[in-house]
Image (cartoon, rainbow, N blue to C red):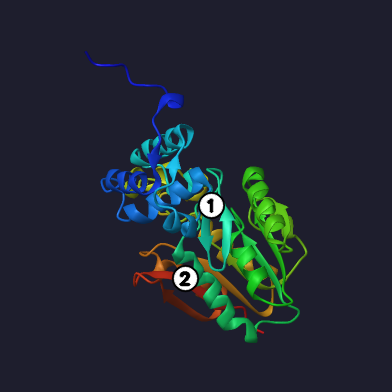
Amino acid sequence: MRKDRPGAAEQPPMELDKRLHSIEQQLTAATDTPRLEAELLVEHATGLNRTARYTRPDQQLTAEQNAHLRALVERRMTGEPIAYLIGSQGFRRLILDVTPAVLIPRPETELVVERCLARMARAPSPLLIADLGTGSGALALALADEVPGARVCGVDQSSDALAVARANGERLGLQVEWLQGDWFAPLAGRTFSVITANPPYVAEDDPHLATGDVRFEPDTALTAGADGMRDLQIIIGQAPDYLHPGGWLFVEHGYDQEAQVGACFRRAGFVDVATFRDLGGQPRVTEGRWPG
C-alpha cells in the first residue's frame, strides 16, 4: 500500500554531497549550468559556502533545508531566474541584491563601465556621473566603486527599484545620490561629465519576451515601443542639455540597433561616435562625445 507523501517537516535527512548531485541532475533540463546553479541554491538554502561543502560533503541536511531546496528547485524548473531565487547577482566587483522589481544585471552591461573607464581621462572635471534607469544601481555603484573622486547619481522612475539600489549602496558603503523621476526630469539645471543608460530597448512584440529569464523581469525595464527605440531616442536627444562640453554619453542597446542608435547620436550633434561589441560579439554599447 502506497504511503502518502510526507510533509516538509517529515522529510528524511540527506547528505550534502548527495543532495547537491540530485539537484544538479534535476536542473539539467532547465539550465546550461546545472552544477553552478545547484551550488548556488544549496549555499542559499543552507548558508554553507564552497569551503564547507568540500570539507564536509557527508554533512546531513535537515528536513527543513531539504524542503527549502525542493521549493527552490521547483521554482527554477518553471524558469524563474536564479538571481531572483537567491536574491543576488554579481556585477563587476560587486554582489548586488536583486528583486523582481529590477532588471537582473547582465555581463553585457559591464561593457558600459569598461567604456566609461576608457574615456575618463578625456572627461571634463570634476567627474560628475549620472546613470539613467539605474534599476538595482549596477552601473551607478560600479562607477562609484571604480572611479576615484567621482560624484555619482542614479535616476529611476520606480520607487521600488530605487529602494533596491539605495539598499545596495548602503550595504556596499558606496556614496550615490538616488533620484526618482523619468529620465532627465530630476536633473533639471544640472550638467555632467558622463551620462550612462541601460534603458528598455526591446520591441513590444519581440518573441524573446516569452522565453527565458525575461518572462519574470519587469516589462517596464525591457520594452520600448514598436521598435524598441523610444527611450533611446529620448535619452540621446536630450542628453546634450545635461552634458558639460566634452562630456560623454554611453548607452546600451539591442544587437540589431547599432545603425539606428549611431544615427541618433550624430543627429543630436555628438562626435567621436563609436559602437563596441560585447563578449558574444554583438554590437552592444554606443558612445559619443558632446563637442567642446
Which secondary structure lies at badge 1? strand
Residue holding disc 1? 88
Q: Is residue 95 left or right of residue 188?
A: left
Which residue appears farthest toward the top when viewing the image? 1
Mark 2 Cα shell of 10 Å, populated few (<14), some (14-19), many (≥20): many
Residue 168 or residue 243, whichever sits in front: 168
Count how many numbered circles sit on residues in the image. 2
Residue 47 or residue 97, whichever sits in front: 47
Residue beneath the point at 42% across and 24% down = 10
Residue 225 visible from this viewpoint:
no
Q: Is residue 65 above or below residue 28?
A: above
Which secondary structure lies at badge 2? strand
Residue 37 percent location from the top left of the image: 39, 52
Mark 1 Cα shell of 10 Å, populated few (<14), some (14-19), many (≥20): some
Q: Considering only order in the chain, which callout, 2 or 1, is on the residue closer to the N terminus? A: 1
Residue 2 or residue 239, whichever sits in front: 2
Residue 72 visible from this viewpoint:
yes
Residue 262 percent location from the top left of the image: 45, 72
Residue 270 or residue 71, whichever sits in front: 71
Q: Is residue 202 above or below residue 175?
A: above
Q: Is residue 207 left or right of residue 149?
A: left
**Front label number (1 vs 2):** 1
Residue beneath the point at 46% across and 36% down = 62
Residue beneath the point at 49% across and 65% down = 109
Which residue appears farthest toward the right when viewing the image? 189
Residue 288 percent location from the top left of the image: 54, 77
Residue holding disc 2? 285
Picture quadrant of residue 242: bottom right
Q: Is residue 92 left or right of residue 173?
A: left
Q: CA distance from mark 1 to mark 2?
A: 24 Å
Q: Is residue 256 above or below residue 71?
A: below
